Amino acid sequence: MIAMSFLFLYPFWYILILSFNEGTDTLKGGVYFYPRKFTLGNYKIVINTVFGNAFMISAARTIMGTVGAILVTAMVAYAISREELLFRGFFTTLFFITMLFGAGLIPYYLQLRNLNLINNFWVYVIPGLFSVWNMIVMKTYFKSNVAESLVESARMDGAGYATVFFMVVLPLSLPLLAALSLFTAVGHWNDWFSGAYYVSNLKIHPLQTYLYRMLKTVESTALASSAMKDPTTAGLQEASLYNPRAITPVSVKMATIMLTTGPILVIYPFLQRYFVKGVMIGSIKE
């Protein structure tokens, strides 16, 4: 188990020490367990570009996208779980069909353009407000874990469907909501595709798209000529930060990877118990 843990953790540790090591010294080899020539220059270059703005865009879309997706999907799931809903079977079948068949990338892009979501921050949030898979999981949980007697008691006391949903159903479903929120938040945080294909405005690119652009740029042989046009690498030209004898594209890449993956790695241990519960949801039938 110790050996397996080492194999899983060492690649991440290797990236960490390279991000704190001078780039030219790394090229010499022999850096395996600790930085041989410690430096913060790699992180200064990344942070002093548009990293901060990209981080805020990712944080905003993750928070708003997660809260909105869980709330909208939970409301649909609760409605579908009620036997008295008219055309309940039709809606369930309609939702399920969308899981099996998709129109494709081009029709999806045209639809986003018709909705004025291209080059718009809300393209990160609105299309992901509803998940059929999460709806099915929530519907199953509501039917099996929320006692119908509680709902009936609340209805007899004069509570409407909205009151029952917010005051009875949601408080009893916190483990489920926490687990699905974790999955949804990770999806938003790791998404680079939306920013790369639906947003050309560099000011509203999320962090992962920024990482994608950074990695493509530092690997390009035309780094110097493109730096003046692309704010991703504009910081590389600042004499106060850029030391060509210490900084290399590889060292900048390692620092960028650490800064983009760090936040989600910090959050994961605190939500691990909900992650395990999320995996077990629906696994036992009685």
Image (spheres, grey):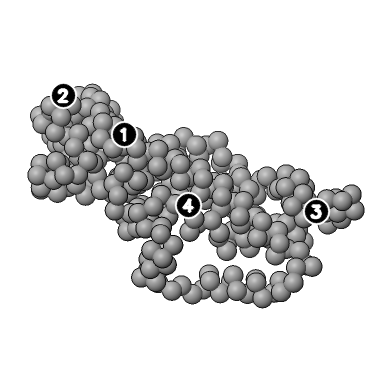
Pointer 3 or 2: first along the chain: 3
| Distance between the alpha carbons at the discs numbered 3 and 4 | 29 Å
Residue corresponding to mark 2: 240
**Which residue has dot 4 on it?**
125
- Give x and y (percent) for residue 148: 83, 57
In primary-sequence order, the first of circles 1 and 3 is 1
Q: Residues within 10 Å of mark 4 (few under 14, many from 20)?
A: many
| Residue at the disc numbered 3 | 160
- The nearer-to-camera label among 3 and 2 is 3
> Real-space Cα distance between discs 4 and 1?
32 Å
Which element carries disc 3, helix, strand or loop? loop
Q: CA distance from mark 3 to mark 2?
A: 63 Å
Disc 1 marks which residue? 16
Q: Are marks 1 and 3 in contact (CB under 8 Å)?
A: no
Quarter of the image holding residue 145? bottom right
Q: Is residue 156 left or right of residue 47?
A: right
Question: Mark 2 is on which residue type?
Answer: Ser
Q: Earlier in the sequence, mark 2 or mark 4?
A: 4
Binning the other alpha carbons within 10 Å of mark 1 as few (below 14), some (14 to 19) or many (20 upward) gives some
